[in-house]
Structures are given as structure tokens and as C-alpha cells.
Image (cartoon, helix red, strand yellow):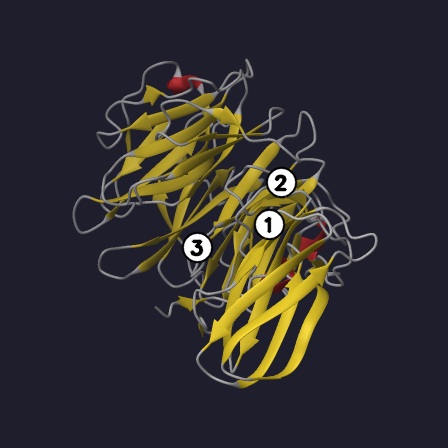
Amino acid sequence: MKQKLVLITSVLGILLCYSQNATSQWVKTGVGEGISRHSVYSIVVSGETIFAGTDVTIDQSTDNGDHWTADTNGLGGDHVSSLFIATSPLGTANIFAGGYHVTPRTSCIFLSTTNGSSWIPVMPDLADDSDMIVALGTNGSTGLFLNIFAGTEGRGIFLSTDGGSVWMQTITKNDLTNDTVRAFAQIDTNSISLFAGTNNTNGNGGVFLTTDNGSTWMRMSNGLPPANVHALAVTGASTPTPILFAGTFGRGVYLSTNKGTSWNAANSGLPDGVAVLAMTVYSSGISTPILFAGTYGNGVFLSTNNGTTWISVNQGLTCDSVLSLALSDSYLFAGTNDSGVWRRPLSDFAISAVSPIVSISNSLTNYPNPFSQSTTITFSTSESGAAEVTIVNLLGSPVARLFEGELDAGGHSFVWNKPTGLPVGMYECVVRLNGKVQQTPLILK
């Protein structure tokens, strides 16, 4: 049966190697502009516009970061630490901005319904100057408006159920009131359950869960070490097997496959004691999501096997302290400490923005697999035409071309002999024929 697939290297086994031969790399955006010298705590993408919350204001770009424009509508301050785009059940895109010492001091959360051209205050400024809005998120809607949750530094969690006009502090327990709430994540979009990642001065934050729209929060940290949680991410949301990830400060990444009931370390390939401050997931049209992690002092890492292993993707990134991450249709953006926003094409990670390609068939196989010296690749096709058979590494870069030319309909067989000096690990055979594609993983041991 034919399937529609996005042309992407899918990794179905353990990542054991990474090619350093990629020619593309990170590029700093807005060179020479104000944002290039600022810390960027939050990035969101709304259509063609990128918003960056910095230590002085919000900057906007409509050309993938080539140029940035600082907010000119009076929204500024010491930190704009959280940005969130909420699309209401009525289809309205609302952009929320929260921070610390946001100017004017009439509010600590501002809302734009005009894609950033104007902002209105929606949450009264907190009384204590040390408090700030650190995270914003939603668990869906219980009416005409999305529920918007605001995580604070030391004031617990606030909730608005009317699009941001009225806010109330949620009932808390287990010391959540005194924690700084750094991140939110929703596993099931069909329920109002919501996870919150926190940290505190004791270095013993955690993950909390509400199933009653914020009325109560339960600590869900069985298996998590004493560590502050700065980032949350989900793969397989609203599927029978979602995976929740927690990025910690100094303990790397932990994951839960049972909705937060228990946790396990997922740090293979990450530096010891790494601080993970940001996480994001690319999953559009692909069977295996790509998970990105931004770290403090070690740059950006990716995992294509749900956190089993990680590889560094830092070519060209001269600022290795990453505070925020965001995805557009074509780029991964990284907000850094005192060095603005950097970007890298998704094509560098074997993500193609082209239209889905129809698979040839499900006949492509190889034997033996794993192999040490050579493997025989076989497949069949019902049509003839121009064909190409290549071997690619994890990032989609070709390492061998087995065939290029005309193929007749029927069965075909090719042998791939291990090239001298090629590292062991995971590769993939990709067969293209008449605009269609077929691929299968290969394990070189």
C-alpha cells in the first residue's frame, strides 16, 4: 500500500555516529543590530513574524531574522522572559508577553491581538519587584477562550479563563507556591491536564501535574534527582504512548513514558552535568519526532530516537549558552545569552520542507543487518524510470551512491561494501524513482 512520507532520514535504532562533514551551520541573525548584543529568553513564531523576548524589549523579524525591529509601542523593561501564542477556539491568534519590570509598570503580562503591532496590559503588576512571569502555557479551552496559565518567580501559578482579562492564583500545595515555574506542557489535548516544571533556591524543583484546571497540583517527581526543571517537551502528544521530557539544570534530560508517574535518565551523548534550559520538538509529517535541547555552556543537541541518544549540532555556533529555542517551517532558532538570535536551516537536520513524496512500495530490505563488511539491498518496483540508490548518514548527507540511471520494472539488488574509514553506526538506504522514495535503516557494526 502506498504511503505519503516527508523525505527525511528516519532513525529507527541507536545513534552511534555523527558525520562532521556537513557544510551548513548556524548563522547569527541581526548582525550589527541591537538584538545581537542582548540575551534572548523566549522566541515564538507567528506566521511570517518571529518574536524575541530579550532583556530590554520584544524584537520582531519578518525575514527569518536577517533584520529585527525593536518594539516601539512602549513595551520594554529589564526582562521579557516569556512569550506565548494562543489560538482561541474562535481562531483568533493572541500573543502574550510576560516578564520582569515590564514597562509601563501597569502590568506584568501584555497581550497583542494585532500580531505585535500594539500591546495592551492584561495582568496587574505583582507587588514584589522580585516577582516576574517566567512561563506561559495552556491546557486548552473550557469555553470560548483558552485557559492561559502564567508561572511566576515565587508566586505560584495564575490562571485566566477569559482570554487574559481576569487572573486568579491557583490553589497550590507541596511547596509549589514558593517555586519558580519555568515551563508548561500538555500531553493530551483532549483533557485539561497540564504539567509544570519548577525550580527553587534549594535546587530541588520538580514536575507538577494538575488534572482539575489548576485547583490542585501534584508533585510527579518519582525517579527525578534533586534538580531544578527548566524545560518540558512532549513527543507523541494525544497518542496512546506520549513521552514527556524534562530538561534539568545540572542533571541533563529525564523522560517519562507513563504520564509523569516515574522518570528515567535520557543522557547518552550529553555532557556530564549539563544544564538544559530549552527544548522543542519537530514532528510535522514524520514518523519519528526530532527533539532539540538548548543547553547552558554546551550549545544545541538533537535526538531522533526519543531521547535514547543525543548528538551535538553546534557547527558555527560561537555562543554556546542557549536560553530559548523555536521552530519555523524552514529554520531552528536559538536565543542565546548576550548574543542575540541564531538560526540554522531544518534541512541541515535532514528535514525537508518539500511536499510529501509517494513511497515506491514497502519492498526495500537489506541483509545482513547489522553488518560489518557488506550488505545486500533489494527492492522491487512496478514501473521503470530514472532512479538513484544512495546511502546517507543521520543528517541526510550522502556517503555512497550505489546506482544512478534507468531502472526497469521488477526486482533489483545492490551490494554496499563498507568504505574504508567509515564510522560504525546508523545509516539509511534511500531509493528514488520517478519522484517517489523508499528508505530503510542500515546498521554498520
**On the rendered structure, is 213 left or right of 251?**
left
The residue wearing badge 1 is 369
Which one is in front in this view, the residue at disc 2 or the one at disc 1?
A: 1
Q: How far apart are marks 3 and 2 (CA)?
A: 18 Å
- The answer, for residue 239, to whether it is visible in the render is yes
Residue at (50% x, 44% y) in the render: 103
**On the rendered structure, is 32 left or right of 376?**
right
Q: Name the foreground residue: 146 vs 19.
A: 19
Q: In the image, is residue 102 above or below residue 85?
A: above
Label annotation for residue 310 = 2
Q: How far apart are marks 2 and 1 (CA)?
A: 23 Å
Q: Where is residue 243 in the image (x, y as percent from the top left)?
A: 41, 37
User: Helix or strand or loop: what does disc 2 sit on?
Assistant: loop
Q: Position of residue 336 (x, y in %)?
A: 66, 45
Q: Earlier in the sequence, mark 2 or mark 1?
A: 2
Residue type marked 2: Trp
